[in-house]
């Protein structure tokens, strides 16, 4: 049995952290679903930027948009919605078979809205309505402004993938926003079944800390943080507050491990997949990591529900001068800035292609 299937049977969903038109048109995504137990996917501006840069498959649509005078941001969402609605349709049988638990795809609100609560709420509702797919998440960052947008979006019935979460405290803020949104729906007599995931970024912790600690602690910070968050996740699902909502028909906001591709060339390319195996969670991984795990990955047990050695390991990092609370805030801020940069690069890429396809004289209207 493939290791990907073993992980699926353990109760963890394998999602692909990639989205290109080539994946759809070539049948590769369908093959991943069939052969590698992939049951969902995530996307982001960086992924789309790379796809548009490297593939001519978007050129015809960009050329039509250029001729119609469509601005770069609007044109991007046309392209992304076209891809993601087709992907959502591929995952629809899984979504229906799991009663809405699995089979999701994700589309991000503009990163420039990270500190704009009202703008995020409006964009989330608009994008979800345009997609017209029950299995499409709208990604909203777990920034302070984003947390307020998450609660309002959940209350409005918009499924949300909370992104850019790094710590237990950031996770709790997002999870509380989800619960408040569901509680308000119940109080208003609305259906409490609104899907959501909370995405915890892992490898960036180790990228930030590896050069500051001795070799014995190398690549151990992200996993320790994940164990701390997983303990909190399990405790929340067992709480009286959640049991009340569950009895009313609510579904859990699932925990998703993001940024699980290994960045350290000296470390195993399946490090985070193997370490983060846990029932009732999701691991969204790059294609390279998916293939590596399918070829030689091994499941060596599951994450401890009590956090295992997380606090002991985090105490060792603290003694080496790593303040995880401060680093979590730094990582979220840097992540927001990185997404902004990727967004601007994406829009510039579309403007460049628009100009090349339509003629440089008309390209200025797309910037």
Image: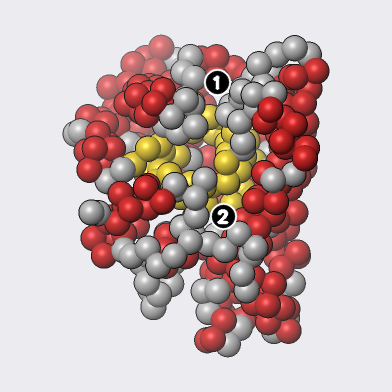
Residue 364: image location, x then y, percent: 47, 27
Residue at x-position 37% and y-position 37%: 39
Q: Quadrant of residue 354?
A: top left
Label 2 packing within 10 angstroms: few (<14), some (14-19), many (20+): many
The answer to whether residue 362 of the structure is visible from this angle is no
138 over 1 or under it: above or below: above
Q: Secondary structure at mark 2?
A: strand
Sequence-wise, which precedes: disc 2 or disc 1?
1
In this view, the residue in front, 29 or 350, is 29
Give the mark toward the camera: 2 or 1. Answer: 2
Distance, label 2 to label 1, CA atoms, is: 24 Å
Residue 277: image location, x then y, percent: 46, 58
- 238 vs 350, left or right, is right
Residue at x-position 69% and y-position 60%: 328
Circles 2 and 1, Cβ within 8 Å, touching? The answer is: no
Residue at x-position 62% and y-position 48%: 164
Which numbered marker is on residue 201? 2
């Amino acid at each position: 049995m493939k290791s990907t299937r073993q992980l699926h049977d353990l109760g963890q969903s394998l999602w692909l952290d990639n989205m290109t038109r080539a994946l759809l048109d070539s049948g590769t995504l369908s093959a991943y679903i069939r052969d590698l137990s992939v049951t969902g996917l995530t996307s982001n501006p960086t992924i789309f930027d790379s796809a548009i840069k490297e593939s001519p498959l978007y050129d015809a649509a960009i050329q039509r948009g250029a001729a119609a005078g469509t601005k770069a941001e609007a044109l991007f969402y046309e392209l992304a919605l076209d891809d993601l609605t087709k992907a959502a349709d591929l995952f629809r049988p899984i979504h229906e078979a799991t009663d809405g638990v699995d089979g999701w795809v994700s589309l991000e609100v503009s990163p420039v809205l990270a500190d704009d609560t009202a703008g995020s709420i409006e964009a989330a509702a608009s994008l979800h309505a345009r997609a017209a797919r029950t299995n499409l998440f709208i990604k909203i960052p777990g920034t302070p402004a984003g947390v307020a947008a998450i609660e309002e979006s959940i209350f409005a019935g918009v499924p949300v993938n909370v992104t850019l979460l790094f710590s237990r405290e950031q996770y709790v803020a997002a999870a509380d926003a989800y619960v408040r949104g569901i509680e308000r729906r119940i109080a208003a007599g609305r259906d409490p079944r609104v899907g959501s995931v909370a995405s915890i970024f892992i490898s960036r912790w180790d990228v930030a800390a590896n050069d500051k600690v001795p070799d014995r602690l190398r690549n151990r910070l992200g996993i320790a943080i994940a164990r701390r968050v997983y303990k909190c996740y399990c405790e929340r699902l067992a709480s009286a507050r959640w049991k009340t909502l569950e009895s009313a028909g609510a579904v859990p906001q699932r925990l998703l491990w993001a940024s699980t591709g290994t960045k350290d060339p000296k470390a195993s390319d399946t490090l985070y997949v193997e370490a983060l195996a846990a029932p009732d969670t999701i691991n969204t991984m790059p294609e390279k990591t998916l293939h590596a795990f399918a070829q030689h990955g091994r499941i060596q047990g599951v994450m401890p529900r009590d956090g295992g050695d997380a606090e002991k390991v985090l105490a060792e990092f603290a003694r080496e001068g790593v303040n995880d609370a401060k680093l979590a805030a730094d990582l979220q801020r840097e992540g927001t800035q990185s997404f902004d940069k990727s967004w601007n690069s994406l829009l510039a890429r579309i403007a460049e292609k628009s100009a090349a396809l339509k003629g440089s004289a008309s390209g200025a209207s797309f910037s």
